[in-house]
Image: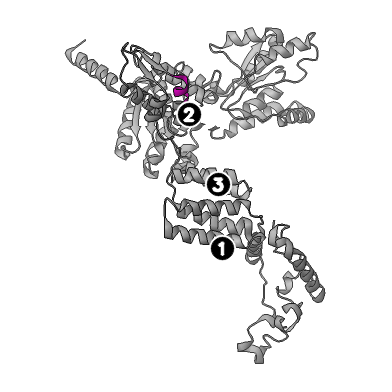
Amino acid sequence: MSEADLFAHAQEERFNREAPLAARMRPRTLEEFVGQDHVVGPGRLLRRSIQADRLSSVIFYGPPGTGKTTLAMVIANTTRSRFVTLNAVLAGVKDIRSVTEEAQERRNLYAQRTILFVDEVHRWNKAQQDALLPWVENGTIIMIGATVENPWFSVNRALLSRSRVFQLVPLGPEALCAIARAALSDSERGYGQRKVEVDPDALDHLANVANGDARSLLNALELAVETTEPDADGKIVIDMAVAEESIQQRAVLYDREGDYHFDTISAFIKSLRGSDPDAALYWLAKMVYAGEDPRFIFRRMLILASEDVGLADPDALRVVEAAAAAFERIGLPEGRFHLAQAALYLATAPKSNSTMGFFDALSMVENEKEGEVPTHLKDASRDREGFGHGEGYLYPHAYRDHWVAQQYLPDALQGQVFYQPSEQGYEREIKEQVERRREEQLAAMVETSAPPGETLTYSPRDHARDRWLMRAISDTGRRLGEVRDRVFAQMPIQRHHLILDLNAGTGLLTWEAVRLAPEGGVWSLARDAQTAEALRQQAERLPALQRPTILLGDLDALPGLIASSSQDTVRFDLIVGRNSLTQHPDKAGAAALLADLLLPGG
């Protein structure tokens, strides 16, 4: 090793020693990766792609600290491809061109692929994303994007259509505790060489307050260890008091311009609409805690007061408007009382969406060619003498109850109903009166009534594959197709599910499973060699990583067949089959065998 290499190696070792605990403990292999089993669990598509080093362009989407960058680094540690990293905040079109030119050269000279990891890919503008698109299209670049923003809104649609999207979710308490224990026991990168003892309740507190963010957890653990004096025996004890000081505020996943902003206000509004005051207060508190603009919250409540409460409680709008005005005078923090009062009033008020009748009327205006104002409703002050405008108008105040039956809608719309009073609150009181007057008015009209109007992964769809799959199952006939549809209609299949077909036969259920779970995986049990070979020949038309795993044998040998076909312990989300147990001599035993192959909740 040269002197320069020795110096670089020493620098790297010093950097690793001085790096934050979260950086030092970043998993290097899939085996060290904790959580996200729906994406990288045994048998899943992404895990198989990484293990086979046959990755296609992907986007990892999820909140901070869930493993997006870590997964990219795991790929970097296992792939034979050249791995390049860019940060979308710092890199521009010039940097992209430099990477693509070198990638093209390596592909031409050495037949080596280039994997480009783009952190915070949502920060690239359209021009930057467009600069990368041709090289992703022709396979020169395999892109791995990481984003906390919904890629459907933040990533170029053309780039998105050439990538698979895997959504990562906040880690659960068990996964976070496992990560903390690994850091405490790792003598190379963590605190394994030091005497550190963490009380169970302190560890639970750290995991709970970290709120699914592994980075936040490890930062808090590092702060606790590094700032706690050892006792006489040299032991560092992390108790509840130390844990509370190390992570005093819960990490709230909230971005005032991102998904959490829109998702949280959506949950708040739906809780108000659903008359759940407890949920409404919770989501309101989350927004206020995260620094949401109270004026934005009041604006949404003012809309809801008319849209979802309306005339069921006409006071709702006045209460919210008064609370908003009071907030402007008081401000924070006391203004939170006015936010809470308005929210509780709306949550407990009777509900009606009858104001939506306006949009029925608007639709009618947009679609109707004829909508002339009836002559007796026209302005009489200008054309009464020449055209008879206003002639025949009946002045309501001249009649009992200040109402008289006469035509108000255009001729072609007589009988059209836009306003439908609800049975709630104030509208219940006026409903009968509104309907009676409507009936009297129609009876008084001679015109004909007009009929009333109005009323955790993504991947681009592979139409060629879908057409082939439809051809593969079409020959089994309409009757079997109906059987297939009934089987899958009863199952809540998700795209990342791992599915086992117990009786592959012609592939009736297998090919449908392949289509329904493209980011998961499908295993099929063929009972004879001829069936297995036929299925394998059909599967060859699919990309290698999307092909089902074909097993040959009987039901009793299934656990052994699965074990010999995978280096991981494989368990399934769903097990399907047609006529699978009808000839089995021990149906109870077979059912128990299959139960052992299911994931919890499968």
Task: Compare residues 381 and 133 and report the one nearer the observer.
Answer: 381
Task: Compare residues 535 and 37 and report the one nearer the observer.
Answer: 37
Q: Position of residue 130 (x, y in %)?
A: 40, 41
Q: Position of residue 451 (x, y in %)?
A: 76, 64
User: Secondary structure beneath disc 3?
Assistant: helix
Q: Residue under circle 1?
A: 318
Please name the residue shown 72% across and 79% down the image: 402
Cα separation, mark 1 vs mark 2, equals: 40 Å
For residue 138, which quarter of the picture?
top left
Q: Amino acid at mark 3?
A: Phe
Q: Amino acid at mark 1?
A: Arg
Q: Residue 406's mark?
A: none
Task: Left or right? Give the position of 90 relative to 549.
Answer: left
Residue 200 painted magenta:
yes
User: Secondary structure beneath disc 2?
Assistant: helix
Of the image marks 3 and 2, the number of the one nearer the N terminus: 2
Q: Residue under circle 3?
A: 268
Q: Which residues are magenta?
A: 199-204
Instruction: Count neighbours of disc 3 (C-alpha within 10 A) and say few if under 14, some if 14 to 19, many if 20 or more.
Output: many
Is the magenta region chiefly helix, strand or loop? helix
Residue 299 painted magenta:
no
Q: Amino acid at mark 2?
A: Asn
Task: Compare residues 275 and 18 and report the one nearer the observer.
Answer: 275
Please name the residue shown 60% across and 51% down the image: 347
Q: Residue 208's mark?
A: 2
